[in-house]
């Protein structure tokens, strides 16, 4: 028999903690989730401090929000023996330690409850989502734990309609919602003028309502004709302020996955004018990599985003499919996007170790023998000097049969071109990460990382058994799934190629498990 967890009352407002304790003790589905999590704890790929589903599979995160002193994460979820997609649901006091709740929104007239976002008002939370084969739908909840969702009587409030060959007047797909001057606005993230994945362009159709019941199409917020590749759509949109005068439009493309625009939102003509474009994913999106996002502004004023990642291997018996990234704090500084791990992650650290700095000779690999682990955080500062590539190998077996390479590659200057054309880059290479036969081949995940003259490489690396997340200089973050098969693939080494480099700073911590059934694996 699985013992129900005890809710620490100091973390939640009293009205939430008491009701949450009742749910985890009495709700049949939540008790089933606890049993299945215990059964799944034998999976060597199951992360200790990332969110993973209690059963079967998860996909896009949805409706991330803060309500009455707690954070709520929703996500596309299929439980055991389910054939239709629900909104899975978890609650947290700190965006890190999650507790399963019963699924929030169930499909009825719609086939599935797909992606959408939420809007928190004073007395309720509004969820808008795509009901497949139906249209975009509204549900609202006002109870402390957001367990009691009431669907709008007019669902789908924005129904699927016939379109011409160009996708006009509009296609209905993934929505998000915001409020302005007592009116509600929603965008439908989709595509037009071609075939998705081939030659179409992304578009976010804009709708307006005064009461959530009736919605009027008023044009487009944004058409993705600036930086995206042909064939990219504008799915799973998150549209929210990133500073006092700029907005962030965080999108998912079914061709290249997560990317974003930052620009100006004209609240009079309801148009978004992008000024900056960037990507959150750089390689093939259906193999081990980052997927879609849900984002919110919390009570601290932070823009918080969380993404799901795609598996790089088939789902196996007694395992689940898909996990969430760590929550990321997105902010705007000097007209560029900063990406940081949220501050709350530091509370999971234990067993700090320090490594004194040293010279890394050219074309050598030096083992850091005092640090090992499969669920750890690393803070590293390296002066690349003139090296063409510097980096660190993690999840490394003693004989190097398995290792995941993280490295910075210095761009080369081409005579006759300005220095601005030099492209430095950061990469995660999993080509040597696993000896398993069923792991998919994957090219390195490689994103731009421009270091200024004299700027050191500053890394925060989060390793959690089957996922690696690398935050670099607050400018870049790369995520990739990795599947080491050997129990002793837990080593670390540093290297430099071409010229010497200098290791300036190296700290490590083991990371606590956020799941009771996985606590026994802490420190390994």
Image (cartoon, rainbow, N blue to C red):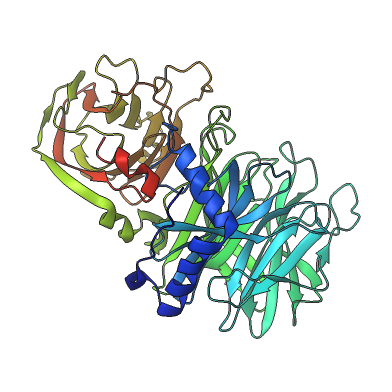
Q: Please report the residue visible at 60 percent of the width from the left and 49 percent of the height from the top.
A: 60
- In the rendered image, residue 347, in percent from the top left (x then y), is placed at 27, 57
Residue 166 spot, x, y in % from top left: 85, 49
Q: In this view, does 396 lie to the left or right of 17?
A: left
Above/below status of 253 relative to 306: above
> Left or right: where does residue 52 sit relative to residue 111?
left
Q: Nearer the viewer, residue 34 or 189?
A: 34
Q: In this view, does 324 lie to the left or right of 406?
A: right
- For residue 335, say whether it is visible: no
The residue located at (16%, 26%) in the rendering is 500
Task: Name the foreground residue: 302 vs 369.
Answer: 369
Q: Position of residue 476 (x, y in %)?
A: 39, 46
Q: Where is residue 69 in the image (x, y as percent from the top left)?
A: 43, 75
Residue 147's place in the image compared with 506, above or below, is: below
Quarter the C terminus occupies: top left
Q: In this view, does 470 lie above or below 122?
A: above
Is 175 placed left or right of 124 in the picture? right
């Amino acid at each position: 028999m699985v013992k129900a967890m005890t809710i620490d009352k100091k973390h939640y407002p009293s009205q939430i903690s008491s009701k949450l304790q009742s749910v985890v003790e009495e709700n049949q589905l939540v008790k089933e989730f606890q049993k299945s999590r215990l059964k799944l704890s034998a999976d060597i790929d199951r992360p200790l401090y990332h969110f993973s589903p209690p059963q079967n599979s998860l996909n896009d995160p949805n409706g991330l929000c803060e309500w009455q002193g707690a954070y709520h994460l929703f996500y596309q979820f299929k439980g055991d023996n389910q054939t239709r997609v629900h909104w899975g649901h978890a609650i947290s006091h700190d965006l890190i330690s999650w507790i399963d709740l019963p699924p929030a929104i169930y499909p009825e007239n719609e086939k599935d409850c797909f992606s959408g976002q939420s809007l928190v008002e004073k007395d309720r939370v509004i969820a808008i989502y795509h009901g497949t084969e139906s249209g975009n739908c509204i549900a609202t909840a006002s109870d402390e734990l957001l367990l009691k969702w009431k669907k709008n009587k007019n669902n789908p409030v924005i129904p699927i309609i016939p379109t011409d060959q160009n996708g006009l007047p509009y296609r209905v797909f993934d929505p998000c919602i915001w409020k302005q001057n007592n009116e509600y606005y929603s965008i439908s993230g989709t595509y037009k003028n071609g075939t998705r994945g081939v030659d179409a362009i992304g578009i976010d159709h804009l709708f307006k309502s005064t009461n959530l019941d009736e919605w009027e199409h008023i044009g487009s917020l944004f058409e993705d004709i600036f930086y995206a590749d042909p064939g990219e759509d504008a799915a799973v949109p998150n549209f929210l302020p990133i500073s006092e005068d700029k907005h962030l439009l965080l999108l998912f493309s079914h061709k290249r996955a997560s990317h974003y625009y930052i620009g100006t939102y004209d609240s009079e003509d309801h148009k978004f004018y992008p000024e900056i474009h960037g990507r959150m994913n750089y390689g093939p999106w259906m193999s081990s990599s980052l997927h879609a996002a849900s984002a919110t502004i919390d009570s601290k004023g932070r823009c918080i985003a969380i993404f799901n990642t795609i598996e790089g291997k088939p789902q196996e018996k007694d395992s689940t499919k898909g996990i969430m990234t760590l929550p990321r704090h997105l902010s705007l500084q000097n007209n560029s996007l900063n990406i940081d791990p949220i501050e709350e992650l530091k509370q999971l650290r234990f067993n700090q170790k320090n490594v004194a700095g040293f010279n890394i000779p050219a074309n050598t690999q030096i083992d850091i023998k005092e640090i090992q682990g499969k669920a750890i955080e690393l803070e590293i500062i390296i002066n690349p000097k003139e090296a063409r590539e510097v980096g660190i190998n993690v999840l490394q077996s003693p004989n190097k049969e398995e290792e995941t390479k993280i490295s910075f590659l210095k761009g080369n200057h081409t005579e006759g071109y300005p220095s601005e054309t030099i492209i430095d880059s950061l990469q995660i290479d999993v080509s040597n990460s696993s000896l398993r036969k069923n792991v998919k081949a994957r090219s390195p995940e490689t994103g731009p990382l421009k270091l200024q003259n004299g700027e050191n490489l500053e890394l925060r690396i989060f390793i959690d058994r089957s996922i690696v997340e690398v935050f670099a200089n607050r400018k870049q973050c790369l995520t990739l799934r990795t599947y080491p098969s050997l129990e002793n693939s837990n080593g670390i080494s540093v290297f430099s190629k071409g010229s010497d480099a200098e290791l300036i700073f190296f700290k490590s911590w083991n990371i606590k498990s956020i799941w009771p059934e996985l606590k026994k694996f802490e420190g390994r």
